[in-house]
Image (cartoon, rainbow, N blue to C red):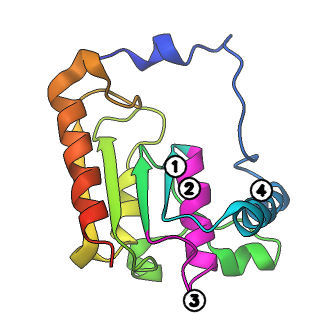
């Protein structure tokens, strides 16, 4: 098992798509994503890691008809925001129990159940997706994406993605 603190130390610089505590920041990121998809697309799928997965899932919950992508892959996904609340300037995270299934395209959900950066978030995201067309793969690599050093986890990840792509109509 990898120590994710080595990958994400407090002194390491990293960039975010948006400030996770700001509805205005997320609205701006969603507008930029929409503009990019409109100008550069169409795209068959979207792949998001961590906060990028939350942004992609929020975008998919906002753009439902027709969906902007045929499938989605979420790696260690953070929880998406409620697009309706965002439109009112509020930041509220979606909750599967309250908000029900929101995403009806094939999805792959890949995460470590002991993710220390977003504990339980990937499970929340997974529950917002249609169980008939979602794949879940759990690994033991922390908040990281499995790589060649964790061959079995990498093969499991690739299998989940392949099964998701196979469900695209």
The CA distance from mark 3 to mark 2 is: 19 Å
Q: Which residue is mark 1?
A: 48
Q: Quadrant of residue 8?
A: top right
Q: Secondary structure at mark 3?
A: loop
Q: Nearer the viewer, mark 3 or mark 4?
A: 3
Q: For the magenta stretch, what is the residue range?
A: 51-70
Disc with the residue nearer the chain's start (3 vs 4): 4
The CA distance from mark 2 to mark 1 is: 8 Å
Disc with the residue nearer the chain's start (4 vs 2): 4
Which disc is residue 89 wearing?
A: none
Q: Nearer the viewer, residue 79 or 42?
A: 42
Q: Secondary structure at mark 1?
A: strand
- Estimate how packed mark 1 is, as few (under 14), some (14 to 19) or many (20 or more) residues with alpha carbons within 10 Å: some
Residue 101 appears at what percent x and percent y?
A: 39, 80
- Estimate how packed mark 4 is, as few (under 14), some (14 to 19) or many (20 or more) residues with alpha carbons within 10 Å: some
2 and 1 marks in contact (CB < 8 Å): yes
The CA distance from mark 1 to mark 4 is: 14 Å
Disc with the residue nearer the chain's start (3 vs 1): 1
Q: Secondary structure at mark 2?
A: helix
Q: Is residue 45 left or right of residue 146?
A: right
Which disc is residue 65 wearing?
A: 3
Any part of residue 93 in sight: no
- Estimate how packed mark 2 is, as few (under 14), some (14 to 19) or many (20 or more) residues with alpha carbons within 10 Å: many
Disc with the residue nearer the chain's start (3 vs 2): 2
Which disc is residue 29 wearing?
A: 4
Main SS category, magenta section:
helix
């Amino acid at each position: 098992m990898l120590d994710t603190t080595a990958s994400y130390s407090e002194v390491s610089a990293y960039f975010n798509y948006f400030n996770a505590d700001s509805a205005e920041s997320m609205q701006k990121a969603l507008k930029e994503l929409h503009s990019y998809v409109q100008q550069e697309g169409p795209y068959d799928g979207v792949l998001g890691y961590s906060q990028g997965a939350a942004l992609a899932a929020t975008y998919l919950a906002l753009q439902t008809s027709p969906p902007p992508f045929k499938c989605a892959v979420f790696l260690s996904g953070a929880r998406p925001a409620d697009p309706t609340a965002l439109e009112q300037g509020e930041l509220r995270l979606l909750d599967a129990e309250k908000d029900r299934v929101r995403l009806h395209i094939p999805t792959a959900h890949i995460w470590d159940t002991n993710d220390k950066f977003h504990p339980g978030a990937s499970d929340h995201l997974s529950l917002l997706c249609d169980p008939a067309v979602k794949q879940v793969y759990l690994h033991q690599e922390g908040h990281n994406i499995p790589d060649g050093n964790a061959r079995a986890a990498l093969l499991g990840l690739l299998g989940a993605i392949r099964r998701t792509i196979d469900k695209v109509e």
